[in-house]
Amino acid sequence: DIQMTQSPSSLSASVGDRVTITCRASQSINRYLNWYQQKPGKAPKVLIYAASSLQSGVPSRFSGSGSGTDFTLTIGSLQPEDFATYYCQQTYSARTFGQGTKVEIK
Amino acid sequence: QLQLQESGSGLVKPSQTLSLACAVSGGSISSGGYSWSWIRQPPGKGLEWIGYIYHSGTTYYNPHLKSRVTMSVDRSKNQFSLDLRSVTAADTAVYYCAREATSAMTYAFDFWGQGTMVTVSS
């Protein structure tokens, strides 16, 4: 089993802040790493795939980096619509999600 | 625009079988380059992948659920299905179906259903 650990589990930030969420895999997953955003009562939406590729239609303030075991999702300038829960997901072996990071308004 | 819609029983008794279907519209389930997954989310908790199926019928299940899961595809109806046997309260969750785009170095759930809540209770 590949375990995915996100940090922090939650954070408070203000509009305009730069926000960074990290995700660590229990073993190397190359760049088989995606990031999703989920708002309450809604299905998740893919933001970043293959560690750093921006999904079509996703604002450029979202970016991803990393390879191997350590990955980062960065929101360059937090907007009101970005308050949500973010999940990383590995697709190297089966499929596993991180536990989520809730981004709340400060 | 591709759309996925889950359907099935919202209430299942313990020890019975949870059965859901996912109808795909706006595209063919037989299109190459995609697999079709079930993912669930217990209330207030994170996401758990259950398994996927290709239009050919090839499946890959979460090892933790494999003994209780069967997925199938009906190309004539453009839908795929999930059976989860011997359910307990721990299987109570919102169940999502999703399409996974697959290509070299790229696997991601790019389209999702709205989700359906399934409660396991007597």
Image: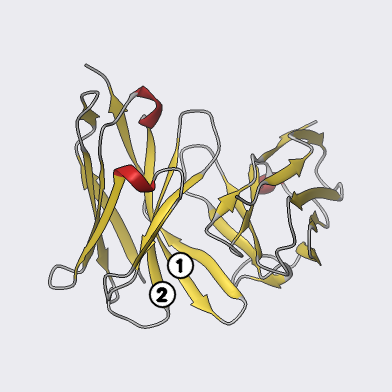
The quadrant of the picture occupied by the C terminus of chain B is top left
Mark 2, other Cα within 10 Å: few <14 / some 14–19 / many ≥20: many
For disc 1, the marked residue is B100
Mark 1, other Cα within 10 Å: few <14 / some 14–19 / many ≥20: many
Chain letter of the residue beneath label 2 in the structure image: B
Q: Position of residue B69 (x, y in %)?
A: 31, 47
Q: Real-space Cα distance between discs 1 and 2? A: 6 Å
Sequence-first disc among 1 and 2: 2
Q: Residue furthest front?
A: B67
Q: Position of residue B21 (x, y in %)?
A: 22, 52
Circle on res. B34: 2
Image height check: is B55 above or below B122?
below
Q: Residue placed at 78% from the left, 58% from the top?
A: A69
Q: Is residue A65 left or right of residue B19?
A: right
Q: Residue furthest top?
A: B122
The quarter of the displayed image where residue A98 is located: top right
